[in-house]
Amino acid sequence: MTEPIAPVFAPGDLVRTRLADPPHHTRLPRYARGAVGTIVEMHGRYPLPDNRARRVPAEPEPVYTVRFAAKDLFGEGSHMVTVDLWHSYLQPAQPGAASKEPS
Amino acid sequence: MSGDHSGPQASLAAQVRHLESLLEQRGLLDAESLDRDLAAYLTRASPDNGARVVARAWLDNGFRDRLLADANAALPELGLSMGGGLQEQRLKVVANSGQEHNVIVCTLCSCYPIALLGPSPTWYKSEAYRSRVVRDPRAVLSEFGYDLPSEVTIHVWDASAESRYMVLPARPGGTDDLDEQSLAALVTRNGLIGVAPV
């Protein structure tokens, strides 16, 4: 049994979601790819569905609630969208980073 | 976006039936007890449960605080739980206020707090709702006949992982004299999803 992945992100941290469009099942919604959001909270540890669907061993990893401004997802809108995302979908982002990478 | 989950999922249903019959053949599953368990679960799963939770939260600030902090720990106070499936699901309750309005969706499939809201409505599983409410919730709510003041910020919660969400609507005015049961009767399923006022 390997050590569980520690929660790397804390509430308030900025993260950028991965941009890649994998050729397998994933639960990173397409509209939320390559976007910068803010960690709201960690809500538990669950195996990565991308691996489970391919029957690849998947250790439970942190799943975070991440809040995005609609403008940063769609280029418009004044609302907020909150998405639950596995650790593997996220990387740290710097304040002032471009809100969404060109896709 | 994955496919439309509103239609009959013929292939999945066939797999489930096949698995069920194999388990029965091997004596691992009793069809009657399975039916009984399913019926019991679906009987218990009703929006009346969500309505009871909301009414209690309106009347009891301590319960409201516990509910918003850790809904799974608060539900047993009303004899409710998010169990009944394979495992207990995490529930997050999100509260509406005069400044903020919450609405729930599952853009990837149709995740929904069945134990508290009962089986989900067909429109909740439609591609139209799932794809549009994240992009333009104000327009979608307007189509439900719910026009929010422009100063209210809308929060869309996409149940994309293992948590399920339920909206705690704001208590309507003029209800000071109502008891818990009468308050619960005001709460609708659509209010608990966030597409209707309460």
Image (cartoon, rainbow, N blue to C red):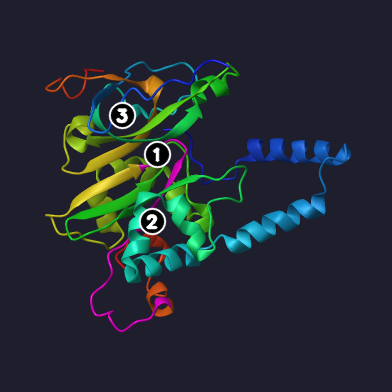
Q: How many labels does the image show?
A: 3
Q: What residue type is labelled 2?
A: Leu
Asked if badges 2 and 3 are on one and the same chain, I answer no
> Marks 2 and 3, how far apart in space?
29 Å
* Left or right of B145 on screen, residue A59: right
Q: Is mark 2 on a helix, strand or loop?
A: helix
Q: What residue type is labelled 1?
A: Thr
The stretch in magenta equals: B158-180
When the figure is inspected, residue B170 is found, relative to residue A72, above or below; the finding is below
Residue placed under numbered mark 1 in the picture: B107
Residue placed under numbered mark 2 in the picture: B67
Asked if badges 1 and 2 are on one and the same chain, I answer yes
When the figure is inspected, residue A55 is found, relative to residue A64, above or below; the finding is above
Give the crowd class for mark 3: few <14, some 14-19, many >=20 residues within 10 Å.
many
Mark 1 / mark 2, whichever is N-terminal: 2
Which of the 4 image quarters holds residue A17? top left
Q: Position of residue B195 (x, y in %)?
A: 33, 57
Q: Where is residue B152 in the image (x, y as percent from the top left)?
A: 16, 54
Give the crowd class for mark 2: few <14, some 14-19, many >=20 residues within 10 Å.
many
Q: Is mark 3 on a helix, strand or loop?
A: helix
Q: Mark 1 lies on which chain?
A: B
Residue placed under numbered mark 3 in the picture: A32
Residue drawn 13% across the image and 55% down it = B150
Give the crowd class for mark 1: few <14, some 14-19, many >=20 residues within 10 Å.
many
Which of the 4 image quarters holds residue B18? top right
* Left or right of B21 on screen, residue B177: left
Residue drawn 17% across the image and 31% down it = A75
Q: What residue type is labelled 3?
A: Ala
For the N terminus of chain B, the quadrant is top left
Question: Magenta includes B171?
Answer: yes
Are the residues tagged 3 and 1 within 8 Å (C-beta)? no
